[in-house]
Each structure stands twice: as structure tokens, then as C-alpha cells.
Image: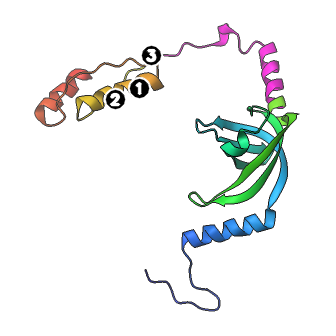
Amino acid sequence: MEFPEETPAAPKPITVKQLVYRLRDTVSIAVGTQWVVGELSNVKHHTSGHVYFTLKEQGAEIFCAFFKAAASKCPIRLQEGMKVHVLGSATVYPDRGQLQLVIRQVKAAGQGDLQTRFLELKAKLQREGLFDAEHKKKIPVGEGLSAARTRAGGRSGARNSRSRARLVRSALQRSPARGRAHCRTRRRLH
């Protein structure tokens, strides 16, 4: 790989990896370990014991990784909408170039403001009757067409559509994928 000419105004280019690692080092030194207060969102308890979540407030958010060694010592179960104080180290996750906090400790601080506002709005709409059955519309049953080269592929596609869209009917039908027979089959299906 050839780099453009280096000049005083434009130093020699660096690779993406070099840039991300420089950013990681700069963030780690500049911010270090810090207590941060915010509201939990997108909380995912992974089977490995790690917990991933977004810590946010109005107008700002940061991704957080709470690894098993520290998460196993946490006395509270992290849930959506909780307001918390977290002790974490700011870093950049190199594989994605993503800013994140690696959490060491979590303390509950009540219910978050965003969650409180959401629950207040939900209660208001409920009082107005907007969640009543008379306002609900029936979801139509859909039909679709998909093709697969193998029977296993067709079964896999049908299984996926059933798990993702339970109201969609699916049926497997053998059908040629190419040639005149394919054209006749398609006309019959439409």
C-alpha cells in the first residue's frame, strides 16, 4: 500500500487500527475511571454472565459493558428505566471503534426521569381510553412467497417465518427454480 507524500501540512497517513488505538489510549488517559449517573436502556443479560446496556439522559448516551467478574458482585438486577450510578472506565472498543464504559460497580439511584415521563404518558393515555379494546384493530393475516434451492433451505425459511411472524401462514410447495416450468408454476401461484 502506498501512502500519499508526507508534507508538514499533511503528515503520513495512519491505518484505521492505529487511529482507533490512539483514540482508546487518549480517552483512557483523559477520562480514566469515573462515577457516572444515568438511566438504563437496552439492558441485555447475556448467557455468559456479561450485562450490556446503554446509559443515557436527555440528549446523550453511551454504551456500557458490565463483564461477568464485576456483574456477579452486583447486588441488584439491572432493569430497563432504572436510574443508576456506575463506576466505569472510558475506552474505545477497537473492533467497532465505539466509545464505551467498562463498568466496575453499579449503585441504584431510583427510577430514571425518562422512564418516569414514559409511565406518566402511558397512564394519561390509559385514562383517556386509548388502550381499550374498542380502539384495537385486527392484524391481518399475510401471505408471501419465498424460494430455496434445497428442501432444507425451504424448511429453514418456513421455520424462520413462523417464529418471526406467527400470524403468517406458510406452506411448502415443490417448484422448479428455472426454465419454462418455473414460469408456469409462478403463474399458477398468482
Q: Relative to residue 121, is residue 177 depicted above or below?
A: below
Earlier in the chain: of badge 3 and badge 1, it is 3
Residue marked by disc 1: 161
What span is colored magenta in the figure? Answer: 117-140
Tag in front: 2 or 3: 2
Residue at 31% across, 18% down: 171
Give the residue type at disc 2.
Ser
Give the residue type at disc 3.
Val
Earlier in the chain: of badge 1 and badge 2, it is 2
Question: From this viewpoint, which residue is outermost toward the left?
Answer: 180
Residue marked by disc 2: 156
Task: Tell me the number on the disc at residue 140.
Answer: none
Tag in front: 3 or 1: 1
Identify the image quadrant of residue 107. Answer: top right
Return the residue nearer the eye: 105 or 151: 105
Q: Label 3's element?
A: loop
Side of 58 relative to 53 (left or right): right
Residue marked by disc 3: 141
Work out how far the residue at label 1 is from the one at label 2, CA to CA, in angstroms: 9 Å
Q: Label 1's element?
A: helix
